[in-house]
Image (spheres, grey):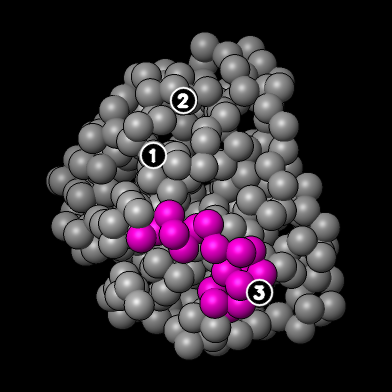
Amino acid sequence: MTFDQIKEIYNRPLLELIYQSSDIHRKNHQAGEVQVCTLLSVKTGGCTEDCAYCPQAARYHTDVKVHKLLDPEDVLNRAKEAKANGSTRFCMGAAWREVRDNRDFDNVLAMVREVNKLDMEVCCTLGMLSASQAEKLKEAGLTAYNHNIDTSEEYYDKVITTRTYEDRLETIHNVSKAGISVCSGGIIGLGEEEDARIGMIYTLANLPEPPESIPVNALVPVKGTPLENMERVSVWEMLRMIATIRIVVPKAMIRLSAGRNEMPISEQALCFIAGANSIFAGDKLLTTPNPAFTSDMEMFEILGLQPRVSFKNENKNEVAEVL
C-alpha cells in the first residue's frame, strides 16, 4: 500500500473509520476475543541507548532502579503466576542495546525453554539481534520477538540517535528469516505530526511479511526523560491509529499497550470495537504502571470479553488489498 492510500484511510471521518475497521476485524477475528499477555522486565535499566521516551536509559536521571538479569527459576515462577492469572503469552524484556553471546544470553535461552514447557506463547524483546542469535532463540522455542520501529523513518532521529532505522529493520529481518513471529509497532505522543504516524503504519504494512502482532503505545511521560512534559494523547488519536492498522493489516493482533493505565474502561472498549484484540496484564509494563489483573478481569466481565487461547492462529499474515 502507498503512503497516500494509508493517509486517505487514516483521515476518514472517525465514526466511519471505526465502523469500517470493526467490520474488517469481525471478518478476520472472533469478536470479543482478546489475548492476555504479560510483559516482565528480566533485566532493568542501565541501557546505553538514548531513546527519548525511555526511563531505562542510563544517561537519564529517573526513578528506575538498575537490576541485573533475573534468575531463570524466578522468571519461570512469574510465568506460572501469569498463566494462572489468564495470560497466554509471556514476554521477557531486557534493557540491552543488543544481544551479546555470553552467559546472560544463555540464561535467556534457558528461560525461553522453560516457559515454552508451560504451553504459553513465548516472546522476548532484547534489543538488536543477529541472524545466528535469532536462530538460537527459535531453537529454544521462542514464539515471537518484539522489536518496535517506534515511529516513521523520517521522524526517527528526533527520538533516537544511538541506532538507525535500518538497524531496527535488520533485526526484524533476522527474526522473520529465523521463522519467529514478528511483533513490531510504535508509540504515539512523541511530538510527531500525523504524517509520522501514517509513515509508521506504511513501514509496517510494507515489510516483506507484515508483523503478526502490532503494539500501539501511547507515550507515558516519565520524569527525567526528554519527553517528560509531553501531554497525554487522546483516545481519539489512539482510535484512529488502531482502526487504520486494522484496515491495513487485517490479520494482525493489535496490542493495546502502554498508556492503558490512564484509560477508563469506556475508552478501552472503544479501542476493542476499533480492532484492538490484545492487552498486557499485570501491574507493570516493564517499568511503567499498568492495570492490575483484577481490574482487567472486571473489565472482561463488564464488556463480555473472552480470553484468547495460546497458539490459536499461526497462519501467515497478509496486508489488505486497497478497495
| Residue 80 can be seen in this image | no
Quadrant of the image containing the C terminus: bottom left
The kind of residue tagged 1 is Ser
Residue in front for this viewpoint, 156 or 179: 156
Q: What's the residue type where badge 2 is placed?
A: Val
Query: Label 1 to label 3, Cα distance in Å?
Result: 26 Å
N-term-proximal mark, 2 vs 3: 2
Q: Is label 1 in a helix, a strand or a loop?
A: loop
Q: Which residues are magenta?
A: 5-22
Task: Give the residue pinned by disc 2.
Answer: 159
Q: At label 3, which amino acid type do we have? A: Ile
Other residues around mark 2 within 10 Å, as few (<14) / some (14–19) / many (≥20): some
Pointer 1 or 3: first along the chain: 1
Label 3 sits on residue: 273
Image coords of residue 42 (percent x, y):
52, 41
Magenta run includes residue 8: yes
Q: Position of residue 173 (x, y in %)?
A: 20, 50
Q: Secondary structure at mark 3?
A: helix
**Tag 2 secondary structure:** loop
Lateral position of residue 321 relative to residue 21, left or right: left
Report how far apart the C-alphas of labels 1 and 2 lie in the structure: 10 Å
| Residue 227, placed above or below residue 11 | above
Quadrant position of residue 65: top right
User: Mark 1 or mark 2, which is nearer to you?
Assistant: 1
Q: Are marks 1 and 3 in contact (CB under 8 Å)?
A: no
Q: Earlier in the sequence, mark 1 or mark 2?
A: 1
Residue 180 located within the stretch drawn in magenta: no
Above or below, 76 relative to 274: above
Is residue 169 at all visible to an observer of this figure? Answer: yes
